[in-house]
Image: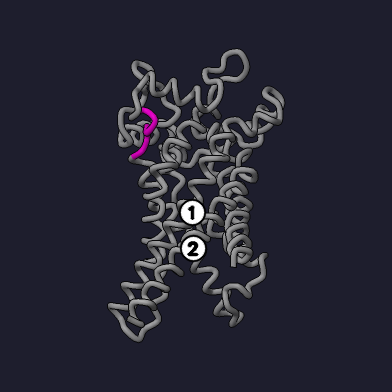
Amino acid sequence: MALDFETGAANVAGWREIAKDLTAGAAGGIAQVLIGQPFDLVKVRLQTQGGGNAFSTARNVWVKEGPLAFYKGSLLPLLGIGACVSIQFGAFHGFRQAIESYNKDAYPGVDPTLSLTQFYLAGGAAGVVNSVVSGPVEHIRIRLQTQPHGAARIYNGPWDCTRKIIQSAGISGVYRGQAVTLLREFHGYGVWFAAYEGLVGMAMHHQQKRREELPSWQIALCGGLAGETLWLLSHPLDVIKSKMQSDGFGSDKKYSTMRHAFRQTWATGGVKGLFHGLGPALLRAMPVSAGTFATVEVVRKFLG
């Protein structure tokens, strides 16, 4: 009976931790959008328009479309990415718990803390779960970011964009580029969480401190460096995703499959073509990822 009570208490504590991660992740997602949206708009423009200079692109947006244009398509990400980051952190904690439980059973008496490979797998699995939401959210955001400005615009906001995509290609059209989204989410978030946990673990070991004793600036720095690692190692997948999600429908469609998009990008731009927009992606990654992890840790501490 005592064992059943202990198991039940452990389960409740586990679910409480997941709920904290979901709440903290939502706050981190909002911070991510507010910090990163201008950088993201420039990145997407460079990816879908065949490269160019990030500074010139940003200046053109400012002059021709105004400063608010940097937040084009930000309503849906503000809601959707808040949900996405919430899912990422909640799912990551769930998979982390499952792997820790496996380690305890498989290697009794040994520290069940995840290895970097296991952190990568937990992060990758969380990315796959998240892709169900992030695929459509990013697809709609990219179409809003890349549409013509002013009277020539195609969509009057995210809901109009969603409606027109469904009219043109059905419900499946909302999930355009989902195969490459799955690959990017698995690899990207596997790298992100593994890099972050590895760096935090190094800081804890070097200073002989517990996680909650690390100063906020160190948490932010670990998060920022993890963000740089994510984009350096997953950017080509993101380029292909952006190309497919800004592609036309019907007779205007240029890319039939992910493989076709890779082939065409390689044929026209070589290796360089797979890294268009990397500059603003890396500029964005440090503050966005630092802000996300710092916000998550602060909210988790606040929730106790």
- Is residue 176 shown in magenta? yes
Q: Position of residue 116 (x, y in %)?
A: 41, 68
Label 2 SS: helix
Q: Residue furthest front?
A: 1
Q: Amino acid at mark 1?
A: Leu
If you read the primary sequence from the N terminus, does the residue marked by circle 1 or circle 2 appear first?
Answer: 2
Work out whether residue 279 or residue 230 is closer to the camera in this orientation and state it. Answer: 230
- Is residue 8 shown in magenta? no
Q: Which residues are magenta?
A: 173-178
Task: State whether residue 54 is above or below residue 283.
Answer: above
Residue 194 visible in this rendered orientation of the protein? no
* Quadrant hosting residue 258: top left
Residue 299 visible in this rendered orientation of the protein? yes
Task: State whether residue 101 is above or below residue 278.
Answer: below
Q: Position of residue 19 (x, y in %)?
A: 49, 59
Q: Which mark is residue 282?
A: none
Q: Residue furthest top?
A: 151
Q: Position of residue 252 (x, y in %)?
A: 38, 18
Q: Amino acid at mark 2?
A: Ala
Q: Are marks 1 and 2 in contact (CB under 8 Å)?
A: yes
Residue designated by label 1: 230
Q: Residue furthest bottom?
A: 109
Image quadrant in which the C terminus is located: bottom right
Residue designated by label 2: 195
Identify the residue at horizontal 67%, vertical 27% (top origin).
60
Identify the residue at horizontal 57%, vertical 40% (top origin).
78
Q: CA distance from mark 1 to mark 2?
A: 8 Å
The local crowd at label 2, few if under 14, some if 14 to 19, many if 20 or more residues have their Cα within 10 Å, is many
Work out whether residue 285 or residue 105 is closer to the camera in this orientation and state it. Answer: 105
